[in-house]
Amino acid sequence: MPHVTVRDVSKRYPGLTALDHVSLDVYDGEYVSIIGPSGCGKTTLLRCIAGIIEPDEGEISVDGRPLIGVPPEERNIGYVFQDYALFPHMNVKENASYGPRVKGFSNRRIRNIANETLEMVKLSERSEARPNELSGGAKQKLGLARAIGSAPSLLLLDEPLGSLDASVRLNLRVELRRLAKELGLTAIHVTHDQEEAMSISDRLVIMRSGSVVEVGKPQDLYLNPQKIFTANFLGEANFLRGTVTTTANEGMTLDVQGERLEIPWRDIPKDVIVAIRPQFVQVSKPEKAPEGWGGRIVDKAFLGDATRFELELDNGLKVTARMPWLGQDVELDVGDETITKFQKDKILTFPHPTGGLESELSTG
C-alpha cells in the first residue's frame, strides 16, 4: 500500500496563497485526517494529491512514483466527494460498477466487484434503485462503494459526511474507518469536524492559512499540543496569561492576574500562556472546597452527559468548566458563589506569543 509524500507544495491564486510550501508524509495503511478552519487549504491539498488541481511548485509521490503531471485517471486513487457526485441516470449497481468498467475489467469481474462493494456498504438490497431514491447516508455509502470498486491504492475523502445529519454522520464515520482498515487502504480524510477527525484517525494534520501547523496522534494533540492554535482548534480551552514567580525541583508557581497557580516543573519562559480544557476545571461551593479561586456562576447549560458552567472569577477572569453531571454538585446554579480548581497535571503552558494571543488563536 502507498506511502504518500508531499514536499514543499504551493498553490497560489490571484490575491490568495491556498498552499504555502506544505510537506506531509502518510504511511502505509494509515487513516489520516486533515483538519482546519474554512479556507485553510485542506481541500486544495487533497485535490492536488488527486490530480484535480496541479500545484505551482513542489512534489507529490505515491510509493515513490511522482504524480505531478499524471492525469487523475492514471493515479489509481479513489475519491469520495461531499456532494456524492453519483450518476443520476444509473442505478446503484451501475454506479458501483463504473470504476472497474472504465478500467476495462471483464464483465464477470465487474459484477463480482459491484456485488462485493455493495455488500460491504450494506446496499445490496437497493441495487436497482436510482440515486434520487436513496437517503443522504445511502448516497454517501454508494459513493464510497464506487471509490473502492476500482481497487485504488489510496482513498481520498473530501468532507464525505459534511452534508449528513448528525446521527447519520456518527454511524457512517465508524463504517468509513472499518472499511478502510478491512481493505488495508491508506486513507486521507478532509473535514472541519474536530470530533469526527479525532474519532476515526490514526493521525491528524492541523492546517491554518495554507500551512501545516502540527501533526500527531489525536490524543497527543488534544492533551499535549505544541501550538496554541492546536489547543484552541481541537476542542475548547481556557487561555490565561501567567508569569512564573517561583521554581523548585518538584514544581513551580505562576501568578495569573493575582491568583497563584501551582504546576509541575517544566522548562518554560517567565511569561506564558496557560491553557486548561473545561473538563479539567472543578467547581464547588466554598464550604466544600475552602482553597481555590473564588468566583461565581454567570451561566449554566445542561449538555446531556455534562453541565457547562461559565464562571466570573474574583480577579476578573472568565473561565469555562464542563463537569459530568453524575459527579458534579447538582445544587450549583447561576449566581452561586464558587471555588474553582484546576487539575494540576492537565495544565498546558506555552511561551507568550510575540504577536499576541488573539493573533495566535485567529483562524484566518
Image: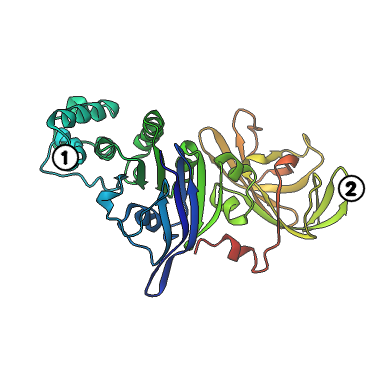
Q: Residues within 10 Å of mark 1 (few under 14, many from 20)?
A: few
CA separation in Å, label 2 and label 1:
71 Å
Figure coloring: rainbow
Residue 142 vs 59, above or below: the answer is above
Residue at x-position 48% and y-position 42%: 27
What kind of residue is marked 2? Ala
The answer to whether residue 253 is seen in the rendering is: yes
Residue at x-position 41% and y-position 52%: 61
Q: Residue furthest left?
A: 89
- Horizontal side of 248 relative to 216 (left or right) equals right
Report x, y in % for residue 245. 86, 56
The residue identified by callout 2 is 248
**Pointers 2 and 1 in contact (CB under 8 A)?**
no
Residue 248 vs 352, above or below: the answer is above
Report x, y in % for residue 58. 44, 62
Q: Nearer the viewer, residue 277 or 12?
A: 12
SS at mark 1? loop
Residue at x-position 57% and y-position 48%: 236
Q: Residue furthest bottom?
A: 15
What kind of residue is marked 1? Gly
In the rendered image, which quarter contains the N terminus?
Answer: top left
Report x, y in % for residue 76. 30, 45
Residue 71 vs 299, above or below: the answer is below
The residue identified by callout 1 is 104
Q: Earlier in the sequence, mark 2 or mark 1?
A: 1
Front position among marks 2 and 1: 1
Report x, y in % for residue 69. 31, 60
Q: Residues within 10 Å of mark 2 (few under 14, many from 20)?
A: few
Residue at x-position 53% and y-position 32%: 305
SS at mark 2? loop
